[in-house]
Image (tube, rainbow, N blue to C red):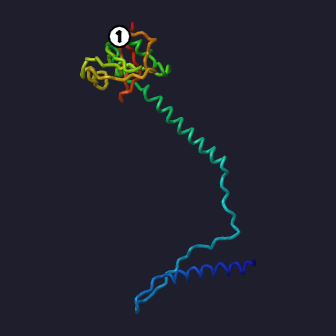
Amino acid sequence: MSPVKSKHSTIAKRIGSRLSLRNSLPKTAPGASQSLLLIDRGPAPREDRTPRQLPDKSEQNTRRWRLGAIVGAIFTLGALALPAIGRDGGNWESNPENVRDWYARLMQPDNPKASCCGEADAYWADRYRVDGNRYVAIITDDRGKIYDDYVGRITRSVGTEISVPNRKIKWDAGNPTGHGIVFLSTGGSVICYLPPGGV
């Protein structure tokens, strides 16, 4: 096709599209003036243009897999870090040195690199019951709201029952406090549980 013919056919396409637009306009009332609105739709599409190359399926799948792996890793690391955030309230000095050291060294049984946290997460649980194959710790901590405010922990009523997952029971660290202790996150999840009777 010659360049001159090509140019004329493009112009003809534009004029044709404008005329079809004019014919599709609503008819006006008799005697009213009618104006023609011409819309320039830009250059006509070229027939010789090659379609955009899409990446093949394996490349798309690889990209999706990488993105999914990154997002999954971020959520997993965040979820593992949350229970390990503990508060000691800076008030361990009221305990003897051996108890302070014990709190500082106490690690989660199912995550040995994460701390059970500190005194601000610990509630006395000198009673328990067994429900099926699980312990249910019963809070017996009667130190009251003044103590809770002092160490910076949430007040939980005496007699509150906490279902303890078996993976959170700590048997290997002894217990110099003389009390069963349940360590709870601010959301109420069990971080560690030491049944009463340890020494």
Q: Position of residue 104 (x, y in %)?
A: 42, 16
Q: Quadrant of residue 105?
A: top left
Helix, strand or loop for disc 1 = loop
Q: Mark 1, residues whose alpha carbon is within 10 Å: few (<14), some, or many (≥20)?
A: some
Q: Quadrant of residue 33?
A: bottom left
Q: Quadrant of residue 192?
A: top left
**Residue furthest top in the image:** 199
Q: Position of residue 26 (x, y in %)?
A: 45, 83
Q: Residue at the spot x=60%, y=79% of the render?
A: 14
Q: Position of residue 20 (x, y in %)?
A: 55, 81
Q: Which residue is denoted by mark 1 in the rendering?
A: 177
**Residue furthest right in the image:** 2
Q: Position of residue 97 (x, y in %)?
A: 38, 9
Which amino acid type corresponds to the residue marked 1 in the rendered image?
A: Thr
Residue sitting nearer the eye, 171 or 102: 171
Q: Residue at the spot x=35%, y=27% of the render?
A: 188
Q: Is residue 171 left or right of residue 127?
A: right
